[in-house]
Image (spheres, rainbow, N blue to C red):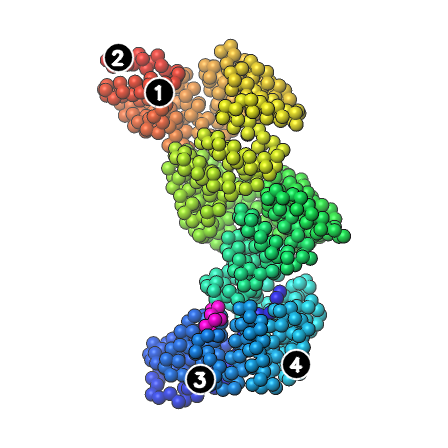
């Protein structure tokens, strides 16, 4: 903790004397207003500053020209941190006639607190001349502080000397010299000035504090704490000493002592952001992550409303608010504060955090520039060297990166440096290399908690639960009372399928920190995963009762509703979460987009996507992807392409993300965009197989069949024991119309690595042989081998239906629906099979499908046709409405248009029926009912 903020103190005793005199000398004063003032003065002396402000404002309601009220109001507002309002009150006091000497010092402090340093140095109201000597000394000290903040070290020392010339025996100038010298890294001179001040005023708490600050910056922790002890023995409420000592206690892991100091600060200075930040650190050390976040939120709540220009010279506050936002996951806000800090005080270790954020946001050049500037001022900072090496790697400057790494690790292969390198590589998109470095760091020192925590998270995201559990167990072993580590262990064990162990870990985490939300949520998720839906519901409802706007709880309730098949309730929870979402909370909106897309509700999906897009920062990648998907679902292909292109730029060197984006680009026929995304993926990771494989698809779409064959052949050479290369060769053969060769290649792929994917590819092409009989036989064989494979059973059911074996198809679909009753596609397929079997139950099944997908054209068509086949005027009337709806949603679907034409014809709407029938034929596709349509047209002539 850096204690070196300018100490701006005032004498409340002198102020109170001034105010009492002002009250005594005042003319006729309203009695009630006077009583308000007296009560306010008493409250101010008792440190009830908010109460004093209320009473002073009450007095001004009666008489706005009461001079002592304006003066005390200014001082109270200043003490309460309302510096702009304090400035107004002091100006009003001057207007009412207060002597400048009475107001110049507190008004200067109000200006400095707003970052108005130059006004203090330049405006006539703050001129030194004509003031009492004591006031001149204090004003020169304030001017020294202002010039030091502005980077004018020479001017600051000149002001100190001016103050000293007025009274060589006063300690003020020596005290003011200490922070100026420290800022200039003149530590010997700073120590000498502190000792001189102490010699002049041995019982002055501020003198002992400045001596402690010198010890502090020199790293002499014992001496610093001893000095702060002396300060607090003289003045128990000395804010700076209390904050500095609490910070040192935390550094020394004397958590109980730190907690005592922080409790004292909480009682007396509940709006002190530095104390709130230290409380967050203490809570984090104790594994109380929920409390830590609450304290970080308190920091931001205190500092965010303050204009940045007001604290632009308070480097410690800029740093703390940046760190607080970073701890809350608000990277964009954190970056803004770190950049403000960089402008006024470059070359600090905060530059490393700023560079990390810049690189993560795709501003690689800026991040590199920030790091290079910092390394020039701190060439011995090996962590920064490692970070810069990682950034160079992201730019492809591998030779420079290697040189820096070797320089940083030369002579001492420190685990913390390995960990820093690993996290730098991960932040630059080189996840694989970063994981290797983190693993190396943990092998050398299993106590690298941050590296271990990051590694567990990476393993979990990669689905490597066993590895995550091993690292988490080591973390728990070293800190068994850390609730956050217990929670991590539970997450890892849950992923490995060890639900009992996971449950025990979550319960232990909850015992250690009852306020920690994460293990409660993870326990609920475990219960959802093990189908203990009622238990999960009770747990989540209890959490919601404590905080009905808790975003994580609302989202888990939405997940629970989804698992129960209660999609309307899921939507309701997500809408509620969206209503309570703050300006930076995007998850509910993104989840709504996904839900609507799965329900094939493109309109609501686009509306939700637009709401998220409107409040998301332009660099939010998930929002860009969601917006693109919603636009694609609504046929806005160009808009989707633009969103995916933006997403590709943001994904930068993240190869897996680029592959996902490329897949979406292919879905909107943007082969060139997909090629761009995949080129970025392969530049970052040339051997990344998913990118290589998808690039074959791109080549086929671009008609570069020779290129596709070369890539597929190279994949086979690199991965002969994987099916993917042979499958891709089969795709290229199909593109050339070589079905025989494609069958053999798909068969080779399936023999090499039997999977659902290889089964589906081979099954599809077998439909071109002997009327599809081999496809049905192959599906039967595969489903017998994998009776638990739902996808295989589904393909078999589709194969039966496609082959006209409707009785077998019915049996297969009904078995699948029994296992998954909320699958609209299965229900729709079964309804169609029942129609072929002339089973009147088709209507009821189609109704169930429509309840799940109320806007899907094919489902609307199925129910409409089933109702029409059932007969009856009411059924025909409803069928007509459904088929009109379906036709408007899918005008190019010939089957839907034929069904509509048939119903229109029977309803006596001959002209319209004729138009729809012709439209069905004009669609140009070969469809099952072509003969029926032609026959219908004959009857409509």
Q: Secondary structure at mark 3?
A: helix
Instruction: Decide which of tag 3 and tag 4 comes sooner along the chain.
Output: 3
Q: Nearer the viewer, mark 4 or mark 1?
A: 4
In the foreground, 332 or 749: 332
- The reply to whether discs 2 and 4 touch (Cβ–Cβ < 8 Å) is no
Give the residues drawn in magenta, as a range.
114-120
User: If you read the primary sequence from the N terminus, does the residue marked by circle 1 or circle 2 appear first?
Assistant: 1
Task: Please tell me which of labels 2 and 3 falls first in the chain.
Answer: 3
Q: How many other residues sit within 10 Å of disc 2, few (<14), some (14-19) or many (≥20)?
A: few
| Mark 2 vs mark 4, CA separation in Å | 114 Å
* Residue ID for mark 1: 923
Residue at 59% x, 26% y is 711
Is 118 part of what is drawn in magenta? yes
* Cα distance between the residues tagged 3 and 4: 34 Å
Which percent across, then down, holds residue 300?
Answer: 51, 60
Q: Which residue is mark 4?
A: 196
According to the image, label 3 marks what residue? 19
In the rendered view, tell whether residue 725 sits above or below residue 393.
above
């Amino acid at each position: 903790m850096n204690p070196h903020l300018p100490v701006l103190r005032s004498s409340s005793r002198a102020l109170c004397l001034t105010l009492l005199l002002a009250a005594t000398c005042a003319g006729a004063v309203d009695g009630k207003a006077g009583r308000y003032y007296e009560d306010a003065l008493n409250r101010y002396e008792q440190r009830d500053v908010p109460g004093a402000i209320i009473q002073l404002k009450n007095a001004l309601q009666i008489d706005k020209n009461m001079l002592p009220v304006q003066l005390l109001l200014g001082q109270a507002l200043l003490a309460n941190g309302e510096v702009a309002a304090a400035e107004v009150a002091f100006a009003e006091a001057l207007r009412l006639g207060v002597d400048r000497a009475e107001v110049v010092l507190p008004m200067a402090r109000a200006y400095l607190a707003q970052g108005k340093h130059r006004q203090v140095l330049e405006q006539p109201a703050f001129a030194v001349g004509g003031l009492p000597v004591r006031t001149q000394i204090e004003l020169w000290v304030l001017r020294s502080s202002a010039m030091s903040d502005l980077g004018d070290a020479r001017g600051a020392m000149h002001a100190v000397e001016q103050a000293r010339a007025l009274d060589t025996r006063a300690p003020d100038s020596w005290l003011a010299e200490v922070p100026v010298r420290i800022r200039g890294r003149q530590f010997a001179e700073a120590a000498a000035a502190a000792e001189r001040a102490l010699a002049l005023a041995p019982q002055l708490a501020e003198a002992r504090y400045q001596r402690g600050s010198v010890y502090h910056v020199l790293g002499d922790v014992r001496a610093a704490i001893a000095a702060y002890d002396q300060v607090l023995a003289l003045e128990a409420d000395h804010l700076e000493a209390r904050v500095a000592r609490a910070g040192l206690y935390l550094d020394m892991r004397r958590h109980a002592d730190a907690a005592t100091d922080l409790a004292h600060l909480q009682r007396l200075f509940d709006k002190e952001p530095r104390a709130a930040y230290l409380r967050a650190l203490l809570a984090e050390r104790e594994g109380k992550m929920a409390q830590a976040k609450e304290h970080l939120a308190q920091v931001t709540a205190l500092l965010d409303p303050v204009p940045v220009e007001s604290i632009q010279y308070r480097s410690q506050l800029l740093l703390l608010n940046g760190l607080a936002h970073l701890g809350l996951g608000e990277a964009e806000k954190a970056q803004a504060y770190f950049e403000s800090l960089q402008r006024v005080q470059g070359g600090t270790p905060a530059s490393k955090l700023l560079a990390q954020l810049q690189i993560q946001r795709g501003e690689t050049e800026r991040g590199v520039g920030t790091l290079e500037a910092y390394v020039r001022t701190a060439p011995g900072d090996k962590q920064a060297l490692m970070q810069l090496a990682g950034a160079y790697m992201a730019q492809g400057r591998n030779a420079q990166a290697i040189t820096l790494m070797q320089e940083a690790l030369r002579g001492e292969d420190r685990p913390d440096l390995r960990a820093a390198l690993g996290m730098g590589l991960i932040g630059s998109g080189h996840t694989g290399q970063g994981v290797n470095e983190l693993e190396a760091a943990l092998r050398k020192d299993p106590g690298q908690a941050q590296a271990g925590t990051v590694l567990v998270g990476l393993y979990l995201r990669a689905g490597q639960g066993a590895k995550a559990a091993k690292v988490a167990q080591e973390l728990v072993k070293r800190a068994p009372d850390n609730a956050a580590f217990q929670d991590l262990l539970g997450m890892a064990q849950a992923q490995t399928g060890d639900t009992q162990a996971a449950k025990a870990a979550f319960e232990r985490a909850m015992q250690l920190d009852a306020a920690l939300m994460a293990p409660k949520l993870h326990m609920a998720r475990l219960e959802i995963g093990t189908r203990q839906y009622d238990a999960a519901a009770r747990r989540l409802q209890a959490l919601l009762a404590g905080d009905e706007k808790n975003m994580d709880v609302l989202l888990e309730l939405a997940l629970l509703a989804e698992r129960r098949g209660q999609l309307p309730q899921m939507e309701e929870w997500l809408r509620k979460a969206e209503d309570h979402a703050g300006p930076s909370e995007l998850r509910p909106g993104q989840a709504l987009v996904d839900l609507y897309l799965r329900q094939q509700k493109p309109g609501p999906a686009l509306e939700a996507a637009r709401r998220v897009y409107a409040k998301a920062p332009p660099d939010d990648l998930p929002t860009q992807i969601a917006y693109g998907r919603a636009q694609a679902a609504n046929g806005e292909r160009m808009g989707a392409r633009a969103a995916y292109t933006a997403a590709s730029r943001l994904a930068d060197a993240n190869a897996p993300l680029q592959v996902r984006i490329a897949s979406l680009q292919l879905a909107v026929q943007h082969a060139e965009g997909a090629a761009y995304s995949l080129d970025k993926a392969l530049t970052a990771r040339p051997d990344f197989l998913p990118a290589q494989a998808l690039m074959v698809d791109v080549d086929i779409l671009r008609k570069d069949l020779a290129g596709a064959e070369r890539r597929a052949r190279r994949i086979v050479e690199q991965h002969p024991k994987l099916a993917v290369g042979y499958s891709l060769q089969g795709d290229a053969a199909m593109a050339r119309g070589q079905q025989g060769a494609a069958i053999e290649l798909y068969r080779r792929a399936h023999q090499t690595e039997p999977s659902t994917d290889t089964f589906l590819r081979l099954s599809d092409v077998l439909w071109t042989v002997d009327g599809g009989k081999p496809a049905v036989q192959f599906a039967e064989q595969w489903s017998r081998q994998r009776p638990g494979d739902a996808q295989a059973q589904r393909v078999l059911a589709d194969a039966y239906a496609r082959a006209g074996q409707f009785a077998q198809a019915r049996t297969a679909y009904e078995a699948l629906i029994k296992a998954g009753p909320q699958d609209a596609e299965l229900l729709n397929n079964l309804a169609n099979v029942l129609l072929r079997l002339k089973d009147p139950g088709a209507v009821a099944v189609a109704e169930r499908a429509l309840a799940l997908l109320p806007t899907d054209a094919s489902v609307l068509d199925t129910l409409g046709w089933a109702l029409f086949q059932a007969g009856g005027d009411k059924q025909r009337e409803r069928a007509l409405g459904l088929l009109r709806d379906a036709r408007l949603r899918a005008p190019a679907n010939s089957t839907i248009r034929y069904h509509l034409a048939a119903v229109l014809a029977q309803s006596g709407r001959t002209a319209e029926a004729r138009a729809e029938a012709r439209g069905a034929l004009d669609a140009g596709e070969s469809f099952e009912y072509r003969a029926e349509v032609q026959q219908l047209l004959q009857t409509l002539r």
